[in-house]
Amino acid sequence: MQMDFHYYATYCAAYIAGYSHRESLDIAYSAQFVDDCSRTLLEKIKGPSSAATTQLQLELMEAGTDPVGLQDITRIWASFHFLPSDLYAVKEKCSKRYLDKYRLICGPNGDLVVKTVELAKGKPVQSVGIAMHVLADTWAHTNFAGTPSLVINNTNHVFYELFPDGDGFKEKQITFRHKKSMPDDLDNSIYTNSLYQQNENTIMNLGHGRAGHLPDYSFVRYRYLPAWGDYEEIVKDNPADYMKAFTQMIYALKYLKGEVSEFMKDTYDTEACRPWLDRINEIIRKRQLTAADDWKAFGEELSGQAIEDFSISKYFDEYTNRGKEERDETFIGRFIRGAMAHKGMVIDEIYKSGNKLAGTVKEKINRRAGQ
Amino acid sequence: MTLFQRVRSVLFGLLMLAVAVFFIVNPSDTAYMFVISVLTLGLAGKGIKDIVFYFVMARHMVGGKIILFQGVILLDFALFTGSLSNVPKFYILLYLIVIHAFSGVIETLRAMESRKTVEGPWRLKLGHGIVNFLLALSCLVFIRQTHTALIIYCVGLVYSALIRIISAFRRTTYILIK
């Protein structure tokens, strides 16, 4: 997902769930900041590098694909962008090495989503934003794993875009190119994707790189052949999935706000957004590279307040101008603690499932955590 | 990385260093034959690795059979290389010059690109580029020397060994805040 959903749509979901304009902005900022909090950025603001929630392209290029490097990549991408749906998934007649990767395939409504939302309960808005990012991405990034893997994340020439046509759909073959400098050509179904690399662990095979930005567009429907799917095609219906992501966020936000007592899988608060259902559907289904303007306009109508554009450095001065001991109580400080707690939880769950791909967690009681 | 993997990495790195230093100090035709043997074994290893990878991982992947075919072909190349131990060293040096000069250009371009966007990582890339240029230059300057190819190979071996040893000491655990 892109900034349009992580920032503006998250703001809308938070406001519909009952948060104030200011709280909704902070939740939206935190949700979007997950896509920006790289080691390079943390180094710049002198934050702990272990709190990184993403990796820049250059950082990935420098990342090793030895066991240590792979664990580092998996920790970040599986925790924040490709939350595994079933760490105990079963596949017959396959090796442990294959199964470990297979079990990291992302999907919605898994046990880890529940744990993610529950972990954010009673925590500051920064943790709420992080949880919303992770939850939303389980819908967009479904069927891909947050670890480099050819045998899981690869795709081939079987890739067709589906256009509504009467009661059914007409198909158009998708063309992929590798020119990152050129925007996707929506009119001609020409999209940019990563190069085919036969090395199992190259970063080219991380996440949905081989499917380009298709999972990030709310309007698109497509049919393709995932590498792990035993030659069974998958139809990905993003408009339906994005609607579920939006309504599940509202439900989760209500739980975090205390209006719902329990967060359960496969539950969506469609009722809360019924007055705006057509409007939301219209935004989701509109063919465009980014729906930021439409979500922003909708959010401003909802709250009657101006939604400021996302400014990455909004809270940097507050963090960098404080002494080390006081930083935990700043906005970025709380985000960092929320990110580390979430990352630790996911790594621990993966490790407990007998899977070493994300490494181990060294438990350490942080003195400041008790204050 | 587990303790066993760390120990294994360090020991293998030290072994590579020892072999490289020994050949640099005592270059000979026997050493050259040894390197040819290593290349043969390397290709064979890659071929076998691909075949194993197919049966362990790619067997379940759509289109995975191509990896099996590739493994078989590499294994065949390994056997072919092993039978070509009498190729003149001049051609091998030409090959090394092209490879290192090309790598040098690529690394330098990537370093320049990195420098425009983020501070830090570009220095390492530029360093790699310069080293590659120096290796290509060395091959060119010493093209008539009998043992140049062997020594260039050994310099690469030293670099790989050092990287392997340094990697073994990298931190692997993650701090959980409760």
Image: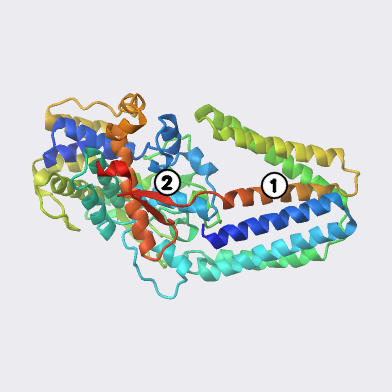
Q: Position of residue A320 (x, y in %)?
A: 36, 26
- Say which residue label 1 marks: B159
The amino acid at mark 2 is Gly
| Circle on res. A22 | none
Residue A82 seen by the camera: no
Nearer to the camera, B60 or B21? B21
Q: Quadrant of residue B85?
A: bottom right
Residue A34 lies left or right of residue A211; in this view the side is left
Q: Quadrant of residue A9?
A: top left
The chain holding disc 1 is: B
Residue A174, placed above or below residue A283: below
Q: Position of residue B139 (x, y in %)?
A: 82, 42
Depth order, front residue of A39/A165: A39
One can see residue A74 in this view? yes
Left or right, B97 with reference to A318: right
The reply to the same-chain question for discs 2 and 1 is no
Q: Looking at the picture, which amino acid does disc 1 mark? A: Tyr
Which residue lies at the image location 36% right of the left edge and 63% below the top edge? Answer: A352
Position of A79 compared to B55: left or right?
Answer: left
Question: For the point 37% across and 55% down, which residue is it?
Answer: A347
Numbered disc in front, either 2 or 1: 1
Where residue A212 is drawn, which disc sits there?
2
Which quarter of the figure has residue A115?
Answer: bottom left
Q: How is the image coloured?
A: rainbow
**SS of the residue at dot 2?**
loop
Chain letter of disc 2?
A
Residue at 40 percent of width and 66 percent of height: A354
